[in-house]
Image (tube, rainbow, N blue to C red):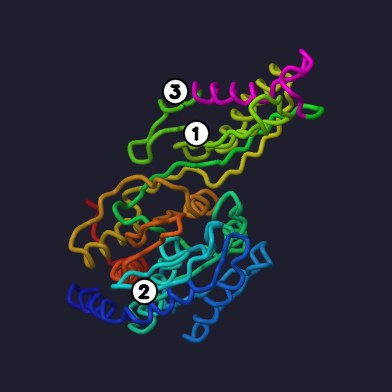
Amino acid sequence: MDSASTADRREKIRSAVNRERLVETAMALVSVPSPTRSAGAVADCLAQILANDGFEVQRPVADWPEAPAVVVRLESNRPGPTLQFDGHLDTVHLPFVPPRLEDGVLYGSGASDMKGGIAAAVEALRALRETEALAGGSILLTAHDHHEGPWGDRRQVRALVAEGFVGDAVMLPEYLADRLPLAGRGMAIFKVSFLRDGDPVHEVLRAPETPDVLGAGAELVCRLRNLNKTLVRTSDPWSGCDTVFVGLIESGEIYNQAPVGCTVRGTRRWVTPGRTEAVEAGFRALVNELAVASGTPATIDFQVQGDAFRVSREDAIVSAFQTAYSAVSGVELPVGGKPFVDDGNTYAALAGIPALTHGPDARGAHTLSEAVEVDELVRVARVYAMTAVAYCGGVVHPPQ
């Protein structure tokens, strides 16, 4: 494809992204409450929007009958790779905030995380179909429930991969816009509970041999703090270092009562891909050793949210993205690490495909004040559509 035709396709895409239609889609999605594990209604809403647009919609159960996933394909009918746009429709468990549009900013539950981003991906799909800009390959759009932890366990992404709903590369419009993340840490959420038999008892009435569950919890916090001092030595130039973090310790009912249980909660993160089983085994060994030493049996819940990942700077999807980003913004996006875990970690680990997270410069994720500028949604839609043209049609420049 010569430079003139490439520029022409980009201009057609730029014009085809419809701001009003994008906003209408985003507001429709935000208007439907969808806490994790209860995203069925918003999935139905998205499916109906796509069907009304003339797309053929599939609804694979994907291991969660309460909210079947939403799948749409756009084919060029010519050889080439498949680029996947993937997003989660569920939100964290906070009081619902209805959508409103003020001064070019969309507010409401999921506006930034990540219904606004999904709407932008949908608008990119529309623009690609209307312009017939794909020179080859295809687009796969997937949307699902079961993302936000600790309520969800990523089961729908795992099922989509197992059932073949996966591209050669995947892009996720999460709220990260200041860098192109080529590495990210794995993460698990842990909950450790130390327990003893019997009832709560006044401190002066407890038997001398009564196990000290609160002491065991405090000792675990100390041991994890010491562990963290060694973990941080394992690092990645983009994604940071291994860590263990304690954010909550719960025990007792009153200051002078010997409690029957103590719970410690936090996170364990790691930078090296493929270390999930070893990380969990090491954590369990540390807790079990303490449980034996303290005489307080422990239960361990270790929920893996995603493995660590890396994307080669030389991968075709990176070049395609930078080509598109430069066309829209005038400069390349700096590369870096992903500060959070998203479904891209799962796609990288299970499907072995490069996963790029890029979305609107939004604010308020995981709060009651989610907000995103409509201009950012329009920008993301254009970047996604142009990335698809470059990736599926091979129109890229080497990464700098």
Identify the amino acid type marked 3. Answer: Lys
Magenta range is 200-226
Query: Contact (CB < 8 A) between labels 2 and 3?
Result: no
**Camera-nearest residue between 231 and 263:** 263
Up-down: is 43 above or below 173? below
User: Regarding mark 2 in the picture, which secondary structure is present there?
Assistant: strand
Please name the residue shown 28% across and 67% down the image: 395
Q: To which residue does mark 1 refer?
A: 245
Give the foreground label among 3 and 1. Answer: 1
Circle 1 residues within 10 Å: few <14, some 14–19, many ≥20: some
Q: Residue furthest top?
A: 208
Please name the residue shown 22% across and 67% down the image: 327
Q: To which residue does mark 3 refer?
A: 229
Q: To which residue does mark 2 refer?
A: 101
Up-down: is 309 above or below 6? above
Whichever of labels 2 and 3 marks the residue nearer the N terminus, that label is: 2
**Camera-nearest residue between 190 and 334:** 190
Q: Residue furthest right?
A: 198
Q: Where on the picture, by quarter, is residue 384?
A: bottom left
User: Regarding mark 3 in the picture, which secondary structure is present there?
Assistant: helix
**Coordinates of residue 24 in the picture (x, y in percent):** 41, 80
